[in-house]
Amino acid sequence: MRRKPWRSTICGAPVFSLFANKNRPFEQTRYLVIDMEMTGLDAEEDAIISAGTVMISEGRIQLGSAEHHYFSPTSIMAEDVAPTAHIHMITDQQREREGEPLQHWLADLSGRLLADAWVFHYAQVDMPFLKINARRFGIKLPRVRVCDTVVFELQKHDRTHLESYAQLNLGSCRKRYGLPQYRQHHALSDAIGTAELWLAQNKIN
């Protein structure tokens, strides 16, 4: 999905753990990397339409753990994908044919105690969607550390050069670490891309 330009006022918000746990070696921390595609940026009105996840454990991306999900339309909120279909390439017909109920995935996510932390690229957008939708379905999300690759970049580099979306999107952040470009706005591809970025950031750090 398209991201808003970064606003530096959200840096340092207490929900975020910017770096790996200093009390535990990185290789001993289990991370669940999550990416979602939404119909917009308003967590109250817009919908999660797909999600991708992959685990990092023992300092490696566990590709065998990778999952990709489409979510079927519901009547809870506006879910017309047409205005954003050119970004994520997901159609209503595809969601009706291949989608599963969002609440099933959220319930599964809430039960995943294998991860010590969740990793996002721009958690300030994704976490409200998770929290609001979990609340709608009566699902209690686990209390885990949340790590954000965007906040990491802002802490590590000169912010004056990283204020724009163009400098903070996943592709630009990956490029700074010499990582190859993947297809963007596909939830699983972006989850794996974020996982690679998180490894690169912490290796250099």
Image (spheres, rainbow, N blue to C red):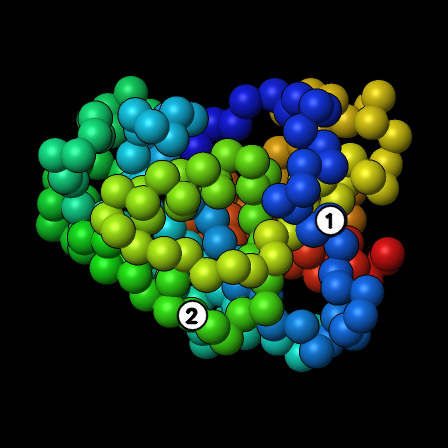
The residue under the point 24% across, 48% down is: 137
Hey, what amino acid is under mark 1?
A: Leu
Q: Is residue 166 above or below residue 37?
A: above
Residue 40 at x, y = what percent? 37, 26
Q: Amino acid at mark 2?
A: Arg
Q: Position of residue 187 (x, y in %)?
A: 42, 48
* SS under mark 1: loop
Placement of the C terminus among the 4 image quadrants? bottom right
Residue corresponding to mark 2:
112
Against 11, is 57 above or below? below
Which picture quadrant has residue 192? Answer: bottom right
Foreground pick, 38 / 63: 38
Q: Is residue 130 left or right of residue 162?
A: left
> Which one is nearer the viewer's eye here, 90 or 142?
142
Q: Is residue 78 left or right of residue 12?
A: left
Q: Look at the image and tell me in which quarter the N terminus lies.
A: top left
Q: Nearer the viewer, residue 172 or 20?
A: 20
Residue 154 spot, x, y in % from top left: 78, 35
Q: Which residue is mark 1?
A: 18
